[in-house]
Every structure is written in structure tokens, then in C-alpha cells.
């Protein structure tokens, strides 16, 4: 990683300026985190030359690492102050978890593919992200041992918000998730107030589907 730092530093700065700031990302904390985390570390070596390109990229197990702008948009929508406990559903490459680690008190990230979780753990260890706990399991069930969560971020699309995730969200907590069908999804922000979820729509999007399995969360 050290040998790539100088190579990619300018790319990270350009990514922040051209892809994030120009599209309306304004949070100084989010922008700083996006500029400081080496996205190339979370990518397949064959695609590292595209680490700061304005699109998603394939990773192992048929999954993707999200477009930098979408990562920043979802992170900003969480409205993190630094004291939150966050649940991420869908570890994927681990890049989103690394960003969250710089902005929240504790991050729990759950992934159904053991190989992806292993690779993500390696990258997170290299960065010293010691406030991130990775779990292998069915993300739709959440992870009750660390609940309730102040924030939940879902990096795979479903047609509804799974009930266990609603139950594990703290009162006044916030969820950021893509909801909809495989062909038509909308990134949404939802806040929990009693038994109601107040919704706000952010932007159309396209994510891999959230798979509900029989494993315990």
C-alpha cells in the first residue's frame, strides 16, 4: 500500500473535487474520510487503475464496490457525528466500512460471503480500523448482540426493509437503503419515530439484490 500512496493521492483529491463536491456533497467530515481512505486497497488488482473512476467495479463473489459518489451520498445521509453505533448490511469489499470507521464510534458490518468478509478484514487491518467488527451471516436479520443501532446502512437492494432491521434500529435512528425492484430502485433515508418510519427519497440507483438466507444473524 505504501508504494501506491503517492500514485493515488492526486486521484483521490480529484475524485473528491470532481465527483463529490461538484455533485453537492458538502460534509467536511465525509469529504475528508473519502480523501483519506485508499479505495484501491479494496479492489481486485486487475481494476485498481480504475479505483477513482466514476463508476462501480466488480469484486469477488459476483458483487461490486459502489461508485464513490454513491458511497459519499449514503454516508452523508447517515448524518454521523462520531458517537454512533452503525450496522452495515453488506460488507462487500469493506470500503464503505472503512469510511464509516472514520466517522462513527463503532461499526458492525455483516456479509453473507465468507471470502468477501475475509478479504475486507485484511484491508481493514492494514488501515488500523479497529472499531469495525465483521460478521458472516444473513444481513437481513441484522446482528442482535450489538443492537440497538443508531444508524443502519444497507448496501444491497430489497423491495422492503426487513423487520429485524427495523426492530434493531434505535428510536430516532436512521436507515439509508436502496429499496425497490431489481429494475427500479430508489435510495431512501428513513427515520424511526415510534412505530413509524419517516421516508425521504434521495436518488434512483442500482444495487445488487439483498439475499435473505437461513443463517442466524
Image: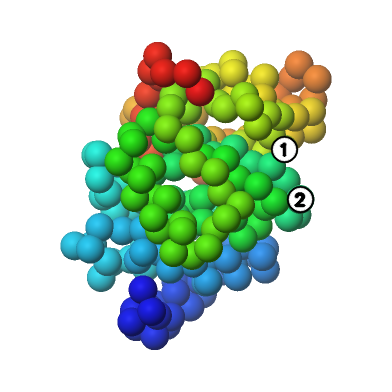
- Give the image quarter of residue 87: top right
Judge whether 217 appears above or below 135 on screen: above
Q: CA distance from mark 1 to mark 2?
A: 9 Å
User: Where residue 176 appears, x then y in whole percent?
Assistant: 59, 38
- Give the image quarter of residue 205: top left
Return the residue at label 1. 150
Which residue is situated farthest in the left direction here? 46
First along the sequence among labels 1 and 2: 2
User: Where residue 132 appears, x then y in whole percent?
Assistant: 56, 49
In the image, what residue occupies the spot 27% across and 49% down? 59
CB-based contact (under 8 Å), mark 1 and mark 2:
yes
Residue 212 seen anywhere in this rendered image of the structure: yes
User: Where residue 17 appears, x then y in whole percent?
Assistant: 51, 74
Judge whether 211 appears above or below 32 on screen: above
- Give the image quarter of residue 99: bottom right
In the image, what residue occupies the spot 79% across and 28% down? 171
Which structural element holds mark 2?
loop
Return the residue at label 2. 83
For this rendering, which residue is in front, 83 or 188? Answer: 83
Quarter of the rendering occupied by the N terminus: bottom left
In the image, what residue occupies the spot 76% across and 16% down? 195
Amino acid at each position: 500500500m505504501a508504494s501506491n500512496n503517492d500514485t493515488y493521492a492526486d486521484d483521490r483529491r480529484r475524485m473528491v473535487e470532481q465527483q463529490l463536491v461538484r455533485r453537492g456533497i458538502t460534509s467536511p467530515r465525509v469529504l475528508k474520510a473519502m480523501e483519506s481512505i485508499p479505495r484501491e486497497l479494496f479492489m481486485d488488482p486487475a481494476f485498481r487503475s480504475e479505483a477513482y473512476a466514476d463508476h462501480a467495479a466488480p469484486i469477488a463473489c459476483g458483487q461490486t464496490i459502489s461508485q464513490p459518489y454513491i458511497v459519499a451520498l449514503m454516508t452523508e445521509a447517515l448524518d454521523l457525528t462520531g458517537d454512533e453505533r452503525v450496522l452495515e448490511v453488506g460488507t462487500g469489499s469493506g470500503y464503505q466500512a472503512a469510511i464509516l470507521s472514520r466517522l462513527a464510534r463503532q461499526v458492525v458490518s455483516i456479509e453473507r460471503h465468507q471470502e468477501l468478509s475475509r478479504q475486507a478484514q485484511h484491508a481493514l487491518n492494514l488501515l488500523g480500523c479497529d472499531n469495525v467488527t465483521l460478521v458472516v451471516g444473513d444481513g437481513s436479520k441484522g446482528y442482535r448482540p450489538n443492537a440497538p443501532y443508531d444508524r443502519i446502512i444497507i448496501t444491497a437492494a430489497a423491495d422492503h426493509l426487513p423487520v429485524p432491521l427495523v426492530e434493531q434500529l434505535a428510536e430516532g435512528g436512521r436507515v439509508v437503503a436502496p429499496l425497490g425492484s431489481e429494475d427500479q430502485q430508489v435510495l431512501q433515508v428513513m427515520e424511526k419515530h415510534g412505530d413509524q418510519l419517516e421516508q425521504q427519497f434521495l436518488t434512483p440507483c442500482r444495487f445488487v439484490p439483498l439475499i435473505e438466507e437461513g443463517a442466524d444473524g
